[in-house]
Image (cartoon, rainbow, N blue to C red):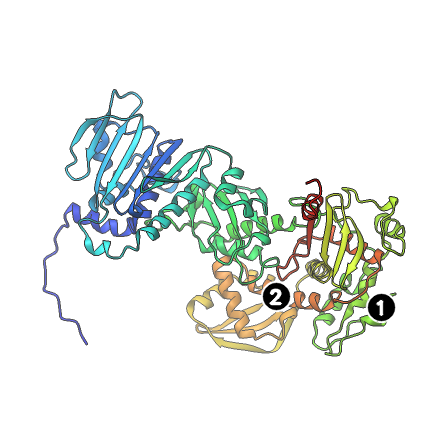
Amino acid sequence: MNAPLSPIRAIQQLPDNLISQIAAGEVVERPSAVVKELLENALDAGATQITVRLEQGGVKRIAITDNGRGIAPEQLPLALARHATSKISSLHDLEHVATLGFRGEALASIASVSQLTLTSRTADAGHASEIDGSTLAVTPSSGAQGTTVDVQDLYFNTPARRKFLKSDQTEFGHCAEVVRRIALARPDVSFSLTHNGKTVDHWNITEIAKRSASILGNEFANARLALDEGAGPLRLHGFVGLPTASKARADAQYFYVNGRFVRDKLLVHAVRAAYQDVLHGDRYPSYVLGLDLDPALVDVNVHPSKIEVRFRDSRAVHQFVFHAVSRALAQTSATSFGATPAPLPSPSGAMPWIRGSQEHLQAILQPGTQVPQQQTSFGPQFAPAANGVAQTTANYGALFTDNDRTAGSVAANYPTALQPTSQTLPSDDFPLGFALAQLHGIYILAQNTKGLVLVDMHAAHERILYEQLKGALDEDAMQVQPLLIPVTFFADAVEVGTAEENRETLHALGFDIAAISPTTLAVRSVPALLKNADAQTLARDVLRDVREFGGSHVLVERRNELLGTLACHTAVRANRSLTAPEMNALLRQMEATERADQCNHGRPTWSQLALSDLDKLFLRGQ
C-alpha cells in the first residue's frame, strides 16, 4: 500500500535550535551519552579530580564537576554554540586528533534537549561565572577553579524521545558503565560517582594495576597477565585475563585506542583469535588493553559517538594485536604466570612421528591411517581402542626418555612406594614439583615448595602433543594440494576484487583462486591439510577473512581443530597406570610447554593447593 504523498514544500534553512535537536538524536542517545561527553570534556581540560552526581538514572539530573582549567567568562556563550571548540582549528588538526572531544557539538546538543547550566572559573579569575543554556545569559557565581555542568530534565522538550528510555536503574547502569570505562583509561584521575545522593563508586589516583583490580574485581586481578609490546609506531599495553578469568558474557572487555574506549570489530576479532587455543568457544576473555599509535594513522571521526575507529593499515594493526596477545598467553606455562617457558630438549629418539617430516604429519592426518606404534614398557594397555581410533599412547613412553639430568636422575631416585627421598625434595627450579602418586588413574599428585599440585594427566598431555604438532607444521612450508578439476562458483564483485588484489596473500595461505569471468571464481588448489573440506565454502570464508582482516584465521582455526582432535585422541587416557619417572617427565614437559595451564579445549590442566590452604582445612594452628 502506497503512503500518501507529502505536500510540496519549498527548501528552507532550518533554525539553529532544530538543528541542535537533530544533532542531539545522534550524540545524546540516552543519559549515559551525556555522561560520556561531559567526562571527555573534563579530561581534555586537564582535570585530575572529577565528581559525577546522578538523579533518577541521569534523567532527572546529571551534574559533573571537575578541577580542570575552566572557561573564561567571555567564552561561555561560545562553549554552548554549535561546532565551536578549542581543540581543532584546521584540517591538519582534524587528521591528528589528540583529544577525546573535538566535534564541538556535544554541549550545544545537550543544551537543546535539557535545562543546562554551566559554571566555570579559570585560575586567574576572581570568581566563577555561570551561563544558562536556554537564555545564554552569563552571570557571576561562586565556585572553585574548574567547571560544573548541570543537566536537568533530559528530553523535557522532546517527550517522544523520553518515552524510549528504560527504567531509572537501567539508565543508571549504563551511566555507571561509562564512568568505569573512562576511569579504567585514566588511573591518574580520581573519580567519584553518586546516585540519588548515595556514593556508589570512588577511585583515588593510583596505577593501572590497582585501578583495573578495583573495577574488574579480584577474580581478574588474580588471573591476569601484564602486556607491553611495541612495534614501530604501535604500542599495546595493559592486561589480558587468563582463561580461568573468562566469562559467559563479553562484559569485561575494555579496549582503548589512544586513551579512547572503542568497540571495534577488527580489534575484538584479533584478541578473540589469540584466545582460540586456550578458551572454550562459548566463553569470552577478559582484558584491559590500550593501543597507542600516531593519531594520523587512525580516523576517530567515523561515528558521532566516536565508538568506532578506522585504521589506515588495518591489516598491520590486526596482526600486531593478534601476535602480541598470543605471545602473552603463550607465557601461561606451568612455570609461573608471566614467565616464558625454557626451550624443551629435542632428542632425536623422542616422538619421531611428531618431530618428523611433513609427510609423517600428513599421514597422521589422513582418515583411517594407522600411526606407527613403538614398543615401550607401557605394555598392551595402550593398544588401539575398539572404536577404530588409533590410540598412539604407546608413543607416550618415548616422551619420558632420559633426555636430561633432571628427568632421569631425579626420577631414578624414587622408591617403589613413590615417597620422595632427600635427593628429590621440591625446589623452585621445578615449579610443579615431583610426583607422589596417581589418583584413580586420572590425576597426578605432586609436591612442590608451595604445597600440593593436582594435574589432570590427559589434559596436560593433550596440550603438550598439540603444541608439538603445531610446531612441527609451522616449521615446514605450507603444503598445497592442486585440484584435478577446479571448483568454480558464482562470486560477487567484492569477492572477485578481493581474489585479484590479494593473490600473493592467498598463495601464501595455500590457495590458488582465480577469476575466470567477472562473476566466477575458480579454486585450483587448497592447503593439503584441508583437501577434504568443501572448497567453495572454504574459499568464501578465506576471502572474507582476507578482506576484513588481511589474513585468514579460518585456515588456522580449521588446522588447529584437526590437530586438537589428533592430540585429544593420542593423549594418555584415564585409568592408565604411570610410573613415578613417567609422571615426573610429564611434569617437566608441562613446565617447558607454552600455554600448558589449559588444554586446547580451555580446561585447566593443573591446580595448586598451598600449605596454608591445607592447614585451614585441618584447622592447624587454630
Label 2 element class: loop
Position of 310 compared to 207: left or right?
left
Looking at the rendered structure, the kind of residue marked 2 is: Gly
**Front-lying residue, 507 or 590:** 590
Residue 237 screen position, x and y as percent: 54, 42
Label 1 element class: loop
Above or below, 162 relative to 561: above
Q: Residues within 10 Å of mark 1 (few under 14, many from 20)?
A: some
Say which label, 2 or 1, has the lower sequence index: 1
User: Which of the labelled discs sits on residue 212, or is there none?
Assistant: none
Above or below, 334 relative to 184: below
Q: CA distance from mark 2 to mark 1?
A: 33 Å
**Front-lying residue, 120 or 554:** 120
The residue at the point 17 percent across, 46 percent down is: 17
**Front-lying residue, 503 or 14:** 14
Does residue 454 appear in this view? yes
Which residue is identified by label 2?
Answer: 510
Above or below, 305 relative to 396: above
Position of 33 compared to 310: left or right?
left
Looking at the rendered structure, the kind of residue marked 1 is: Gln
- Figure quadrant of the N terminus: bottom left
Which residue is identified by label 1?
Answer: 374
Above or below, 196 relative to 490: above
Residue 118 screen position, x and y as percent: 24, 34
The residue at the point 77 percent across, 64 percent down is: 441
Does residue 92 appear in this view? no
The residue at the point 31 percent across, 47 percent down is: 57
Q: Of discs 2 and 1, which sits in the foreground? A: 1
